[in-house]
Image (cartoon, helix red, strand yellow):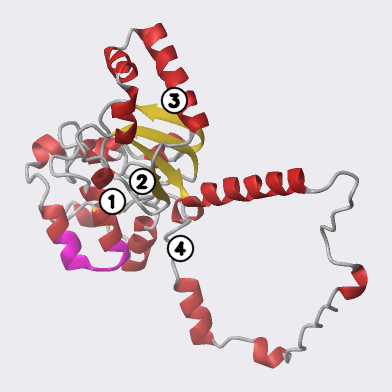
Amino acid sequence: YMTGGRVVVLGNTGRNFAAGMSGGIAYVLDVNGDFKSKVNMEMVNFETVNEEEEILWLKDLLQDHRHYTGSAIAERILKNLGAYLPKFVKVMPTDYKKVLDAQRVAKSAKKSAPSGALVMTTAPAANKPKPHEPAVVDLEDSMVDADTYKKRSEMVDKVRGFMKYKRRGDAYRNPKKRTKDYKEISARLSDHDLKVQAARCMDCGVPFCQSSSTGCPIGNIIPKWNDLVFREQWQEALNRLLMTNNFPEFTGRVCPAPCEGSCVLGINELP
């Protein structure tokens, strides 16, 4: 979720790098040649470091890093900067690049404009097209029928679900009834309510889920499971959940037990 600034990475990165990266620039040293396979390419592109101003900035930053930390990696790169430069991958968000290019064009146009000359930035008022009046719609035509209204009300927003919907848990069954059987003590939500709750998953790919050594033992299972529940693919969701550990006395009912504790949504509200 980087939104601005510049960062230089001299070590390894995890999977899903640059997910949600809408701004800023990342310079990643790809010594092993496997970095590009770990990047989420939804919002970024790759570039090389070849502009003189950029190279000088990178060199100055490496020198500062070596000075303040005694970094052996920075020392090694500075001694042979020409060989290491091609190994730096510049990760640039596509929308951010468009903004920078537009600013660069505007700046160059301002410089090339003759001094004292007036630059026309807007069309003359006389040449402005007259705005079209909106067509008058019959009131009866604008009314929706009951079926359309029901479909609209049942639509669940997956993109903004984590902001629109609140956490809901299962309610307990009536104790007079549940004490007479061995069924679940809670009453499950309806399919639609489960879909709404699944829409709250941000699919953020937090490192707690992604890491195979400190998080889920087989990768990022819970966000995929939530997505299958949202799509109402119940059998596939069950198969996905059965891939996790089947020892609830160690892991909880849904493995891994710490998944809610690592949920980013829990920063400011219930996960």
First in sequence, mark 1 or 2: give its number: 2
Q: Position of residue 205 (x, y in %)?
A: 31, 44
Q: Residues within 10 Å of mark 2 (few under 14, many from 20)?
A: some
Q: Is residue 34 left or right of residue 271?
A: left
Q: Residues within 10 Å of mark 3 (few under 14, many from 20)?
A: some
Q: Residues within 10 Å of mark 1 (few under 14, many from 20)?
A: some
Label 2 to label 3, Cα distance in Å?
30 Å
Q: Is residue 236 magenta?
A: yes
Image quarter where the N terminus lies is: top left
Q: Principal SS element in the magenta part?
A: helix
Give the residue pinned by disc 2.
Answer: 204
Give the residue pinned by disc 3.
Answer: 58
Give the residue pinned by disc 1.
Answer: 223
Q: Which kind of residue does numbered mark 3 sit on? A: Leu
Q: Which residues are magenta?
A: 229-238
Q: Which kind of residue does numbered mark 4 sit on? A: Asp
Q: Residue at x 39, y 52 (%)?
A: 168
